[in-house]
Image (cartoon, rainbow, N blue to C red):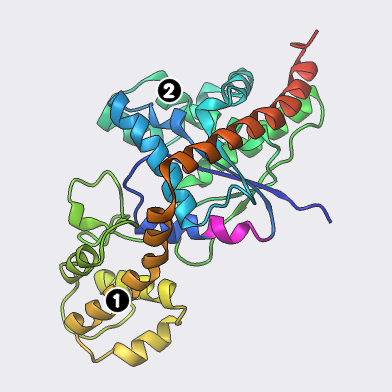
Amino acid sequence: MTRKTVFSGLQPTGNIHLGNYLGALRNWVALQDEYDCIYCVVDLHAITVPQDPGEFRADRHEAAKVLMAVGVDPERSLFYFQSQVPHHTELAWILGTITGTGQLNRMTQWKDKADVAGSNLGLYSYPVLMAADILLFRAEAVPVGEDQKQHLELARDLAQRFNARFGDEFPVPDPIIPKRGARVMSLQDPASKMSKSDPDEGSRILVLDDPDTIRRRLKRAVTDSGRDVRYDWEQKPGISNLIEILSLFTGKDIPSIEAEYGEAGYGTFKDVVAEAVVEGLAPIRRAYRDLDDAEGARLMQRGTLDARTRAEGYQQKVRELVGLAD
């Protein structure tokens, strides 16, 4: 039985945090068991905001290494740097010619980023490149969070529009939305998602943080009035966020956690959550330390070559359909 193809990408940053891991990356790893997975470091997307070139170069390789440490296996998945496979941008240009500006004007994320970094064409056309990322390898499914649904809808729309105009070429990709862990909130502001761009480092836990840092940040996590450990996002968003994190790391359901720790008090409960996170992230830290930088670079080079070969076959079909192939 042929396995369905899944695509996803992550922007390069050394600040891969708990929200990334629980909300997306752990799911990436699990998907490798049942799908033909294609994962990449989407470094072209990252340069839509200013970057220091030297730091950015290091961040790209750091992100790849962290993803491998998390469990993205280059022996089981196609894994590479987006910028090293030019077919992404070629397909993005072709798809851009059938994308209405009205659709792009309705995109919300570029407006948010433009407020911070200033507007540019890259930010504006970012969703078209994301659609090309997904469609290039004919992905049939895409793991997405709630904030990425709009971008996937554009990819689905462009696949249908291309197929109607030029011939049935692209599958219309379906979303894979994790039932749990799609939103991990800031430790300092549980009304906001945990974010790598938050200037308060105490708002997040990085997957490579040492145990003392993890314990310290969870001890300082914002909680709520009262002392009962109860799952209630309206009245107790801070403690509810910690309950979610503990549930995701231990596999215990939320009612069981409430029953066990309901009267324990916030201090004791934070200690329990901290130890679960320390233990859960320990294998990632070990795998990261054990992965040699040169070996990581070699695996990415191999993945890039494989991706280029595979992409060329697919992209040639697109060129033929739109009249660009002689």
- Identify the image quadrant of residue 23: bottom left
Residue 183 can be seen in this image:
no
In the rendered image, residue 57, in percent from the top left (x then y), is placed at 36, 30
Q: Which residue is mark 1?
A: 275
Q: Is residue 183 magenta?
A: no
Q: CA distance from mark 1 to mark 2?
A: 42 Å
Residue 317 can be seen in this image:
yes
Q: Quadrant of the C terminus?
A: top right
Task: Find residue 122 and name its label.
Answer: 2
Counting every numbered tag in the picture gives 2
In the rendered image, residue 73, in percent from the top left (x then y), is placed at 57, 52
Q: Is residue 32 magenta?
A: yes
In the rendered image, residue 110, in percent from the top left (x then y), is placed at 39, 32
Mark 1 surroundings within 10 Å by alpha-carbon count, few (fewer than 14), some (14 through 19), many (20 or more):
some
Mark in the foreground, 1 or 2 = 1
Q: Amino acid at mark 2?
A: Gly
| Front position in the image: 152 or 129 | 129
Relative to 237, residue 95 above or below: above
For the magenta stretch, what is the residue range?
Answer: 27-33
- Identify the image quadrant of residue 159: top right
Residue farthest top in this picture: 326
Q: Amino acid at mark 1?
A: Glu
Relative to 52, residue 266 above or below: below
Which residue is found at the position 66% from the left and 34% from the top?
306
